[in-house]
Amino acid sequence: MAYQVEGELITPAEFEDDSRWIRAVKAHRAAAAHQPITSTPPASTLSNTPALPPNTTPTTTTLRRHAPLPRLPAEDFKIVFRPGGGFDLRTTTNGALLQTLCTLATIDYATARAADRVRINPYNNSLTVSTPSESHARLYLRVSELRLGSISYPLRAYMEAPDNALRGII
């Protein structure tokens, strides 16, 4: 059976041959790489009329690639905290959060600062504390609220599964 492409008859072998597509894509990429990028100024700068219809507001779309979070030691105990009450973890520093958690968990701040690590995940508003000490991990798990100044926020704490654990298998 012959195929017709823009008035030309081609064989099925020619139709299914992918090498033409590969050559076409490579040629398109090569042409785009050698072509200088030019942009025209927006219509609003060419004349004094706005570029948007009168009843619309401009919106900005920001597409950012998320950098991976730093890895925590695999052999440590990892306690995840999720704050409630609308508290945004990005508004405080790691050191201030560790100091507050140490105060609430009755842990010496100097030893915790030397051994424990704090990681804030800004994308899901969670805080992970990694500690090599089992006693510190047990004390961190007892913290149920986060007090910053005179404001108290509810806090849910749980221990993260080890890195080599499988989900759903106990």
Image: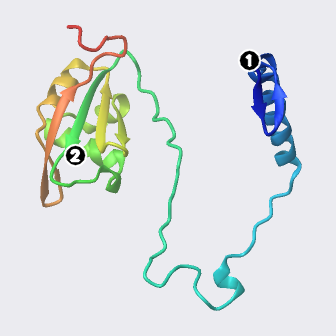
Q: Earlier in the sequence, mark 2 or mark 1?
A: 1
Coordinates of residue 59 in the picture (x, y in percent): 47, 68
Disc 2 to disc 1, C-alpha distance: 76 Å
Q: Nearer the viewer, residue 102 or 85?
A: 85
Q: What's the residue at 32%, 42% (across, down)?
A: 124
In this rendering, would 69 be left or right of 114?
Answer: right
Coordinates of residue 51 in the picture (x, y in percent): 59, 80
* The image quarter in which residue 103 lies: top left
From this view, report whether residue 8 is shown above or below residue 40. above
Coordinates of residue 158 in the picture (x, y in percent): 19, 28
For the N terminus, the image quarter is top right
From this view, report whether residue 158 is shown above or below residue 151. above
Can residue 106 be seen?
Answer: no
Q: What's the residue at 19%, 34% (across, down)?
A: 107
**Would you name the residue on which mark 1 appears?**
1
**Would you name the residue on which mark 2 appears?**
100
Q: Residues within 10 Å of mark 1 (few under 14, many from 20)?
A: few
Q: Residues within 10 Å of mark 2 (few under 14, many from 20)?
A: some
For the C terminus, the image quarter is top left
Q: Nearer the viewer, residue 82 or 79?
A: 82
Which label is found at residue 102?
none
Q: Nearer the viewer, residue 100 or 129?
A: 129
Residue type beneath disc 2: Thr
Residue type beneath disc 1: Met
Disc 2, SS: helix
Coordinates of residue 117 in the picture (x, y in percent): 36, 32
Can residue 57 be seen?
Answer: yes
Tally of numbered discs: 2
Closer to the eye: label 2 or 1: 1
